[in-house]
Image (spheres, helix red, strand yellow):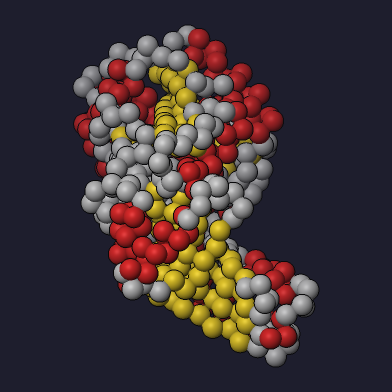
Amino acid sequence: MKLVMKFGGTSVGEGKKIRNVAEIVKQNSNNSIVIVTSAMNGITDQLIGIVEKARKGESSNAVLDTLQKRHEQAIQDAMTKADVRSKVKQEVLGLFQRLKSIVESGTILKELTPRSKDYIISFGERLAAPILAGTLEDLGLRSIYLMGGEAGIITDDSFGEATPLMDITRQKVKNTLEPILAKGVVPVLTGFVGATQNGDISTIGRGGSDYSATIVGSCIDADEVWIWTDVDGLMTADPNIVKNCRLIPQISYAEAAEMVILGAKAMHPRALEPANERSIPIRIKNTFNPTANGTLISKDITVKKGEIVKGVATIKDVALINISGMSMVGMPGTAAKVFNILGSQGINVIMISQSISESNISLLVRRNQLAKGLNALELALLGRSSVKDISFEDDVSAIAVIGAGMKGTHGVASRLFGAVAKKNINVRMIAQGSSELNISFVVSENDCDETIRAVHDEFKLG
């Protein structure tokens, strides 16, 4: 098989874990394998902190020294051969010299451009890749490490949230990686990192390593993309809330998108798109339980007999905004105006519901964006439009019930809200799309966990 394997930050968090990852790769080395690695866990956040300190003119030397020692220790713990250790250590020390140089320059100037910030935070993956490649060599495999841009991932110049240019990327990645695979070499790529057409280093946003993996998989027509993380796969609910939740063995791209967007811990939602476009299956597996089958995500929508719901997911840390006014009835453009105001402030609307009377619009946003959103809406709408009142609730959570089996099945909503009502829980807001894959609703944050357990029990998901 031709496989792309992506390893997350917890999987490569220290030397012994990197060794474990390398052993997993070796056990599967009868396949053609491309590795995509994240930074060691916590490193990207520390690099972002270094950027912020540099902008204030504050030194990060102590932090950088700590990061260097951590990577040196990882090299020591991951490899046994002195010559391999020495080679990798020299490469890593060279990377730290370049990192320290750019940070020092930014600190002196108290200024770092978005391009400079991308350059700095790319070092998390750039430091992890040679250590993983060296560990593979230590185990007797031939390996080479490449930055995302060197592998052929070309993006626009929207630094921090760059968008891959897929036509040129597909050609370049294929031309770069296929000759390497043909020689039996395992390429280790930096996830999250690409390059602009001018050769500047760019990053493709948080969760970008998952995205990098499926981009590469689509470019080389991989048989599967394996996302290695620290959970067995997608679960029917959060195991911290529902003790008897279980693994979902198979799920469609559409169902998986609903779950991961709602925070199911496994992968980033953007990663589904390239795989979906090329019908490449994604398998979520646990680095610390590698024999488990995990969850297979594919184009097939499988509904077992009697299976209506596949999972219950939630988003906490959200807030509800209610916009109302009798004069809104029959007034075109009110909703558009609301969305334009919030969009201009960089505020994403997670969920929306509007009564058929048109006198009320309810919106769900991230809680940390509530104050900013309220301020913008009140300044633009109150006393200047048909909107007469804007209120909010900042103690809510959103819950989504997901499954292809709901489509065309009578009585799903009745069972769902009946189970919630039996617990004396009040529903604040409801939304459902025409796909019928998802029923979303909002409850008090204090009622969230009990609601999830009630729904999980009602549909016998345990």
> Residue 201, located in which quarter of the rendered image?
top right
Quadrant containing the N terminus in the rendered view: top left
Residue at 52% across / 22% down in the picture? 222
Judging depth in this view, the residue of 359 and 97 nearest the camera is 359
Q: Total marks drawn?
A: 0
- Is residue 441 visible to the viewer in this orientation of the structure? yes
Q: Is residue 49 left or right of residue 177?
A: left
Residue at 59% across / 25% down in the picture? 219
Judging depth in this view, the residue of 393 and 417 nearest the camera is 417
Q: Position of residue 213 (x, y in %)?
A: 49, 32
Residue at 37% across / 11% down in the picture? 30
Residue 250, compared with residue 51, is above or below; it is above
Q: Is residue 459 left or right of residue 351?
A: left
Residue at 61% across / 87% down in the picture? 389
> Residue 331, located in which quarter of the rendered image?
bottom right
- Is residue 205 visible to the viewer in this orientation of the structure? no
Q: Position of residue 280 (x, y in %)?
A: 53, 27
Judging depth in this view, the residue of 124 and 88 nearest the camera is 124
Q: Position of residue 209 (x, y in %)?
A: 47, 39
Judging depth in this view, the residue of 39 and 398 nearest the camera is 398
Residue 34, compared with residue 51, is above or below; it is above
Residue 92, compared with residue 220, is above or below; it is below
Q: Position of residue 298 (x, y in %)?
A: 50, 31
Give the residue at the far front of this rendering.
410
